[in-house]
Image (spheres, rainbow, N blue to C red):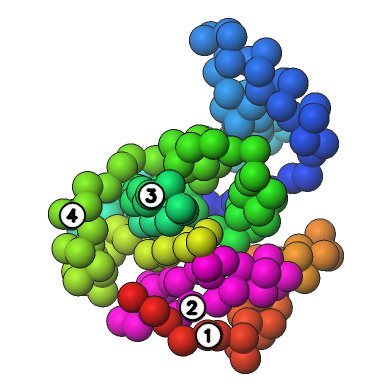
Amino acid sequence: MIETVRIMIDFNEQRYEALAKKLSKNSRIGSVEKSVERYLEYLYETVVPAGQRKEIEKEIKSAIRLEKASGEPEIKFSVITLRTEGGNISFKSEKLLIFLDLIKCYRDKVRDWENITDLETLKSLFGKSHVVKAESLPLLVNRFCNNQSVTMIADFDFVNDTVSVMKNGSTEWSAYRLKDVASAAFLAYQKPELHLSERRKIFDEYLSDREIPYKK
């Protein structure tokens, strides 16, 4: 499987919104994330010597060929349901692949969501996504363990302030209070120098005795 590194940076919210608004009016430039991605490519090509880049590209192409030959799915996604007093919506998110990522996004973008008036806007905060039809959701849940594309299924219940999750490799739902998962994510990201595996350990340890009964 081709390995990637998730880069997460903190940036002033007002500056981000102003920048995103300006960029949205320029179809050539695109989003803030796309602009940062293009700059990283430029930085990579500027700093890393051509010979080394050539070797890296060979390794990447080789990994892609092996991945295709093994039948490993190239696109992975998580399935998220949002439940509010105004209804619910389920969708595939290509951005959030592990529970910690999901809760980090909730803490940073969704927790103070009183000013958000509709589910579509709320859904957009979880990144690029595609709506899952109501009749398709039970099939995704039932086939979760056998579907290597689905990395996690999560259900946010904003009416009862809970989140339920079925993690990859599990057949059971786990449920938590939103305030507890937000605190777990805060602790996991307190030290910027920590590796992702260390963050996940802090996150999981905090939640280890805070699970609540799952309600369908």
Tag in front: 3 or 2: 3
- The residue beneath circle 1 is 212
Label 1: few (<14), some or many (≥20) within 10 Å?
few
Q: Position of residue 177 (x, y in %)?
A: 59, 74
Q: Secondary structure at mark 3?
A: strand
Tag in front: 4 or 3: 3
Q: Secondary structure at mark 2?
A: strand
Q: Which numbered disc, 1 or 4, marks the residue that appears first in the sequence? A: 4
Mark 1–mark 2 CB contact (< 8 Å): yes
Q: Is residue 151 left or right of residue 180?
A: left
- The residue beneath circle 2 is 175
- The residue beneath circle 4 is 136
Amino acid type indicated by mark 2: Ala
- The residue beneath circle 3 is 87
**Image quarter (top left, top right, bottom left or bottom right) of the N terminus:** bottom left
Amino acid type indicated by mark 1: Ile
